[in-house]
Amino acid sequence: MNRNEFAALCSRTVLLDGATGSNLMKKGMPRNVCTEAWILEHGEPLIELQQAYIEAGSDIIYAPTFSANRISLGKHGMADRVRELNTGLVALSRKAAAGSSALIAGDMTTTGELVEPLGEVTEEELFEAYREQAQALYDAGVDLFIAETLLSVLEAKTALRAVRSVCDLPFMCTLTVMEDGKAYFGGSAAELAEELPALGADAVGINCSAGPDRMLDVVKDITARAKVPVIVKLNAGSPIPDAAGNMTYPMQADAYAEEMKKILALGAGLIGGCCGTTPEYIRKMKELITHV
C-alpha cells in the first residue's frame, strides 16, 4: 500500500483490531515471557484471534511484532533474533488474513528504556533498534507501519525517522498518555498531532491510556490540531486487578461502542480497541459505523 492509497482508505472510518496480549493470556500465554517468541511458538491462538477480528470487521490488523526490537529482545537474551521473529510473526498474520482484504501493519513500540538525558540509551541507539526492526518488517512484506504505545514524542519521531530511512510505506503513530494528554516521558498528544504529520506521519493519535469515556478532551484536542487522520484505540476502561493479580477491564462492549460514537463525532478516523477489548468490541464498532 502506498501513502496515497492509505489516504484514500481514510476517506471513510477505518476499523482497527483490538487487544492481543490480554486475549492471548486467556489462551495460556504466561506472564513475564518474551511475548513475541511465545507467539511464534504457539501460532494458532494468534491466528484464531486475528481471524476473529477480521470477521468482526477489522480493516487493519497489527502483526504481533510489538517489542521485537533488539533492545527489548535483549532483555530475554534474544537480541540476535530480530529478523527471525519479525519475519515469522508477519507470516502468522498473513496466514490469518488470507482470503480477506485486511491489511497487515508492522507493529513497533517503546523499548521501555529512557533516552538520554533521562536514561542511558542514546537517540542513535534507539534509531538503530527501530531501523533494524523496520527493515525486517518491510522485508517481511507489511502493508504499512504502526508505532504504538509510545511514551514520548521523541520515541515517535525516532521511529518515524527509522521507518523513513527504510521505505515510504504509510506510517501511523500513537502515544499512550495520561488523562491530561501528557506523555509519560516527554511531550503530549497535542505535540504529536502538530509535529509528526509535518515530518511525514500519515495518521496520529492515542492508544492504551484509559477508557474512551476518560479521553474525550484529549481526542478533541488532537482532532483540532492534526492535519492527518486521527487514531483512537483505547482500553476497555481503567484496569482493576483481580484476586490473582490479573488485570481486568470493566467497560463492556456495548458501553465501549457508545463512547466510541462520541469519539467519532469529535473527528477520529481510525478506531479500534486496546487492553481488555475482544472481537466483540470490534463487532459492536462495526455496527456503529454501518449505522452512522
Image: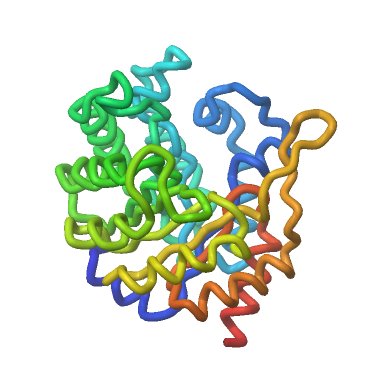
Q: Is residue 140 visible?
A: no
Identify the image's colour scheme: rainbow, by chain, secondary structure or one colour.
rainbow
Up/down of 289 relative to 25, above or below: below
For the C terminus, the image quarter is bottom right
**Residue at the front extreme of this rendering:** 180
| Residue occupying the point 74% across, 39% down | 26
- Camera-side residue of 2 and 183: 183
Residue 168, by quadrant, is bottom left
* Coordinates of residue 213 in the picture (x, y in percent): 63, 65
Number of numbered tags placed on the structure image: 0
Residue at figure coordinates x 35%, y 23% from the top left: 71
Farthest residue, direction top: 77
Vertical placement of 163 versus 34: above or below? Answer: below
Describe residue 204's horizontal placement relative to residue 199 as left or right: right
Left or right of 166, for residue 192: right
Furthest residue to the left? 165
Figure quadrant of the N terminus = bottom left
In the image, is residue 292 above or below residue 60? Answer: below
- Residue 259, given in percent of the width and then of the height, sits at 63, 71
Image check: 22 left or right of 221? right
Residue at 21% in and 30% down: 123
Q: What percent of the width, then of the height, locates residue 235?
A: 61, 53
